[in-house]
Image: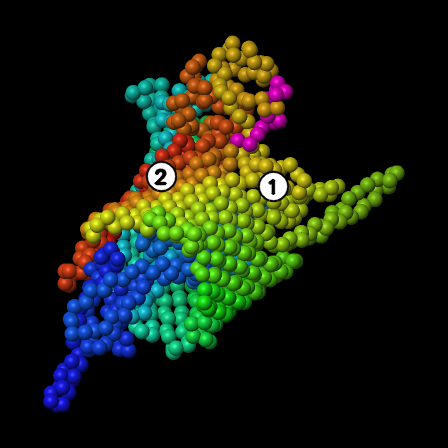
Amino acid sequence: MVLFLFFLAGYSQQPKTITGTIVDSNNLPLSGAAVKVIGKEIFDVADMDGNFSLTGVSTGDVFRVTFLGFVSQEVSVTNANEYFVSLFEDTAALEEVVVVGYGSQKRADLTGAISTVRAEELSKNPTGQAMQAMQGRVAGLQVVSSGSPGTSPAVRVRGVGSYSGGDASPLFVVDGMFFDNIDFLNTADIATISVLKDASASAIYGVRAANGVVLIETKSGRYNQKSQITYEGYAGVQRAQNVVKMANAEQFVTFVRETGSAPDISFINNAMQRFGRSRINPNVPDVNTDWYDEILRDAFIQNHSLNFSGGSENAIYSIGANFFEQEGILDMKNQYERFNLRSKLEYRVNDYLTVGANVVFSDATRYDPENGAWRSAYFAVPILPVLDPTKTNATPIPYANAQDLGYRGGQNPFPIMDLSENRNKLRNVLANFYAEVNLIPEKLRFRTSYNHNFESIESRQIRLPFFLGENFQRENASILRSNINISNQIWDNTLTYTDNFGKHGLTVLAGTSFRDESLELLQAGALNFPLSGEEAFFIDQSQTIVADLVRDDAREEFGFSYFTRVAYDYANKYLVYGTFRADGTNKFQEKWGYFPTVGLGWVLSEEDFFGENNVIDFLKLRASWGRLGNDKVSASDGSITSRPIFTALGDVRFSGLLTNSDFTFLKWEETEETNVGISATLFNNLTVEADYFIRDTQDAVIPVERPLIPGATRQNVGELRNSGFEMSVSWDVAISKDLKIGVNGNFATLDNEVRNLAGAEFLDAGTAEFRQRSIVGQPLFAFFGRVVEGVYQNQAEIDADPVAVANNLVPGDFKFRDINGDGQINDDDRTVIGSFLPSVTYGFNLNLNYKNFDFSTQLYGQAGNQILNRKRLEVIFTNDTNIDRDFAVNRWHGEGTSNVYPSAAALRKGWNQRLNTFFVEDGDFFRIQNVTLGYTINKDGSMPGIPFTRIYITAEKPLTVFDYNGFDPEVANGVDNQTHPIPATYTVGINIKI
């Protein structure tokens, strides 16, 4: 009997294979859930249908099931061979993934304003610039697109808080390294982007955090994850949209004849003599060039990413490569190519030591467009062809020259397009190495991290000669080369203590940070190298080196910081969060700055009086205050200058020396911000985040006039305010096993105001013709001009208005508002007529998943901003150019024809050419940002031998609705001086996971 029982016991311990399924509380499969047998090297990862398999287990073994955001569960192995495991959501675990400066924090414990966008959302936008994919996804984040390949968009968090710098971009932190932009990153390599919007969230970064902070975490593997190979790729075409329609030949001729300009009419006659008359209308030259159509092209775009990731119990890895190529829509050598390599490794040496490394290498080549071509195409008359075969003396190509018809400028954009090249080679190496020591398990850990970014920018500008006329030529072949090497190093050391005792939770962080930033520049230029091809594009092959273009420069900045953070909660309902950072720098005379912040939170839903209900699952009130710094202003500078002066005393001439000392004593600008907000979860799956903020920039650097001393000096005496309301709502629900719906939207307002200019009423920017003025009580850099009240329609209206009579106005001229009521119209009647900053931005996203199909769409828009249509107003400088079709069709050409547009003759009259509300247009727009439709093969893993494969098509920016008379209403500074068009992009892509 004893032997028999021993035999049964031994048989029960024989290894076997078990299978199972892992689902959530809605019985939906949890793909990617990790299953690990405790104490043994046996593990698996659930497939797309939640299925797993474990081989070599024995009865009595225990396997643990874990999945991010869910409570882990331990299951004992019995005689059964199949197991069904249901995991329940763990709110606390979900909250742990929220990234904050130098660590992470539970979302439920946040007292500041932080928004996070994950990889699956970013990957829907086919773009080479990661921040471009963020457009419309975060309330309070404004991303202004750039249509030029490889060029970063303008990024603003909660407005503009600096007068002098003009650089309102946030601080970008990539795996601990600081950057001014992240254009070198591959979007497919990013795991999350978190935007720290308020002072409570940002102040841990001190002197660089005034414009907000964008934290980027790159992708990594997971412990106990099977090796996985992922390929993501797409290819498509870009096409210019909303192309500005210019007047055709007949409209242009009609316009010119209505101006009554005898010289311009003679130019038309010259064109008819040179190129012949149109057979349709013999009063029009037989040329009808659409210059935008000539210079634009459909452009190719492609992206390919390959990633290997996985992990064992003690190590994780993620290795990837990416190739991205984007042609420009300007028909010249205009494109961007980038090749990236990335590796991220982490290894648990033992129970108390973990080490890791993250290296990103980026090698890009960007050929920038000749932006002057957009300007030339706008102004070029349609009665001029691209080529003129009669120009036998033209070299190297017989491009047409408008000067041959009598015009002052050559106008043709093709010589500068075809005979210019702007090449930039961009190389980035980001290396991050770290070690983390658990001094007291689960309580006290020390982390040291070294980050080094080396960036090389090699620029080459080539200008080849051409001759089209005495005043339309480029005599010399020229080359300008520059090499910029940038080295940034940061060494961080942090000590973090975490403890829970009773109802108390406490996390304390203390750390130091050392940074060393250096830049070296070497530049030289030369003339007349051999025209034998690119192999001759070198300075040593040139005949003449231009001494004035030789430049050798460098700068280096050091900084050292101390910082600390305390996060405390009581019973998960009373929250206190505080940070303090002391920043030292050699950039200013005042070496140290101190940046404190405090945040409070109250989770009402945890209170006993709140009670159980079926509506509000979670409700938190939060408030924060903090002080931040902005060192994106020029360093202190100054000089002692002297000049000789002469005077006569009697009949004797005396000489002297006048000496002037002009030094600036500057420090960083400081921003003080107050934020109040609410976080709520309703009906189990409706999440609401709302914030109101007031952000005051104190000690803003502005130019200040000095009594009795000519000129101005920069001083920290200005004050600006940005305030607004932000709201984000998201709703995700599984209607059934086959249908899931996700909806989220965001909305933000912004009020920008100049508060103090050191006693001055205003400060001017821009030229006198295109005046922008910062006035106390008004937005920064507001457009300042006259208000158009209509157009004079007839002579009786002229005779009845003393202003019109006094200024010899005629029907078709503008009627301006008398702002000060003195019965005259002059510069005193100028007022604020718009701001380039939108007062409202909004975004909306819809995601649908039905069986193997997925569909998503993203909408985006803004309102309340204005755009100065400078290209239309540049008639001030030259009036012998083309006009846009909008004006040609809608111009005033008789009583009642228009009360908005002036006449053709009026457009060329100085009275109508003052900056006014006709030239400053509304910048409101609504855009379908993205539409994606996909289909997944083997989604549930039921087809052996076939990998998970998703095929999709995408339309990026296919439709933009706006009234502005330009290519696109996205203009970073609000002044449209031939802004690069933003194309629509149509792609086909595929994702494969093995």
Q: Please rate how many residues cluster around mark 2, counting C-alpha atoms within 10 Å: few if below 14, some from 14 to 19, many from 20.
A: some
Q: Is residue 130 above or below residue 757?
A: below
Looking at this rendering, what residue extends furthest in the right direction? 650
Residue at the spot 18% in from the left edge and 81% down from the top edge: 13
The residues colored magenta run 821-833
Q: Is residue 761 above or below residue 485?
A: above
How far apart are the two marked residues, 1 and 2, measured between alpha carbons?
Answer: 34 Å
Residue at the spot 45% in from the left edge and 61% down from the top edge: 571
Residue at the spot 58% in from the left edge and 16% down from the top edge: 803
> Residue 927: which disc?
2
Q: Quadrant of the C terminus?
A: bottom left
Q: Is residue 441 above or below residue 681?
A: below
Q: Nearer the viewer, residue 933 or 644?
A: 933
- Residue 401 among magenta residues: no
Horizontal placement of 42 versus 443: left or right? left
Horizontal placement of 262 versus 226: left or right? right
Give the labeled residue for mark 1. 755
Q: Amino acid at mark 2?
A: Arg
Q: Please rate how many residues cluster around mark 1, counting C-alpha atoms within 10 Å: few if below 14, some from 14 to 19, many from 20.
A: many
Residue 488 at x, y percent in the picture: 50, 63
Residue at the spot 47% in from the left edge and 65% down from the top edge: 504
Q: Nearer the viewer, mark 1 or mark 2?
A: 1
Q: Can residue 129 be seen at all in this image of the molecule?
A: no
